[in-house]
Image: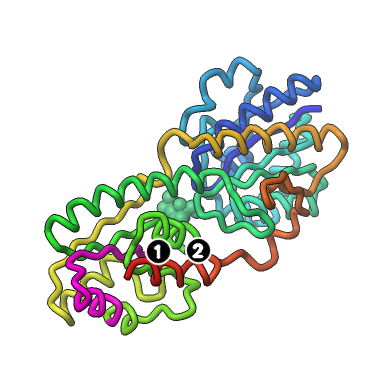
Amino acid sequence: MKIGVLTSGGDAPGMNAAIRAAVRQADALGHEVWGIRRGYEGLLEGDWAPMPSRACANILQRGGTVLHTARCPEFFKPERRAEAAAKLRLAGIGALVVIGGDGSFRAAETLQREHGILCAGIPGTIDNDLPGTERTLGFDTALNTAVEAIDRIRDTASSHGRLFLVEVMGRSSGMLAVHTALACGAEAVLYPESPDDSYGALVARLHANWLRGKRSSIVVVAEGDDLGSAVAVGERLRREHGLDLRVVVLGHIQRGGSPSALDRIWGSRWGAEAVRRLDAGESGFYLGEVAGALAVLPMARVLGAHPVPPDDLGELVDILSR
Ligand code: F6P
């Protein structure tokens, strides 16, 4: 069998581990892997090449994706998907391993349903916002990157007795923000799904901390929070309360870097498992982790509700920072 492997959407540390494992497991089972460059964009253009086992040397520890990636709105058009399916058939590629997030899995689910291309999904996004899995590739690395950065900010914040607003990624998910805030002892966290995310509550919290003798604070702000970006919240605090604060946007720093051991291990397990299951004739699934064990989920599950950060973690940030 010829299996195509692609990475799509935002890159995430651990994607290379998954590519390597898929290629080498396929090799062990006598299948051929073709690397599709630039995600669905490359798929539409037939931008692919055979990927032998040796092509994966020394990629396990590298961040990003050696196959490159793209966001490809064109793939949402039915006629473009039909073209892509025809191209795959012509090249003899009958199955795909798709490494990406929500949008990537939606595209795979449609491609399989409409055109019978066998698809297996591996969760790869630093957002950790896919249904049915407690982990996605890149989350652990991004979390550790953000925590390390904020530990450094904490030193200067406490030296100057200053307030810092630190923006972490997460356009529609607060998973990274809440876990980062808890891990670095932030005084507050703002995130899109928060039950009581109000400007008034933030000001009250900062004021209470001040009265308690706290002279420096760190507020973690998820990129997609309802109050706006960290820059917007910072401007409002300056304007309305005259606070001397600093804003740091961590941005794409969180997406790069060598994957953590956990992201390498899960990338390796999922890459191999995806190919083993395709080899056994299964398709239309994505892999995950539930309570430490490897989980298999129907691809259509991605169309359902997405996980939100547990409320108790947000509350814990508040209680532990007093
Ligand atoms: O989906 C991963 C992610 O890093 C989000 O957290 C962020 O909102 C988005 O990608 C940024 O995308 P881009 O790199 O295309 O600006």
Disc 2 Cβ-to-ligand 1 distance below 8 Å: yes
**Pointer 2 and pointer 1: residues touching (CB < 8 Å)?**
yes
Q: In this view, does 267 lie above or below 126?
A: above
Residue placed furthest toward the right: 281
Q: Name the residue under label 1.
A: 222
Q: Residues within 10 Å of mark 1 (few under 14, many from 20)?
A: many
Q: Name the residue under label 2.
A: 173
Q: In which quarter of the image is residue 306?
A: bottom right
Q: Answer yes or no: is residue 36 visible.
A: no
* Viewer-side residue, 64 vs 83: 64
Q: Is mark 1 on a helix, strand or loop?
A: strand
Tell me, yes or no, whether the highlighted magenta stretch contains residue 212: yes
* Viewer-side residue, 73 vs 235: 235
Q: Name the spot of residue 58 as percent of width and height, x first.
A: 51, 20
Residue type marked 2: Ser
Residue type marked 1: Ala
Which stretch did the figure color magenta?
Answer: 204-221
Q: What element carries label 2?
A: loop
Q: In which quarter of the image is residue 262?
A: top right
Total labels: the figure holds 2
Q: Name the spot of residue 125 as percent of width and height, x first.
A: 54, 49
Question: Which residue is rendered at x = 37% and y = 49% of the image?
Answer: 146
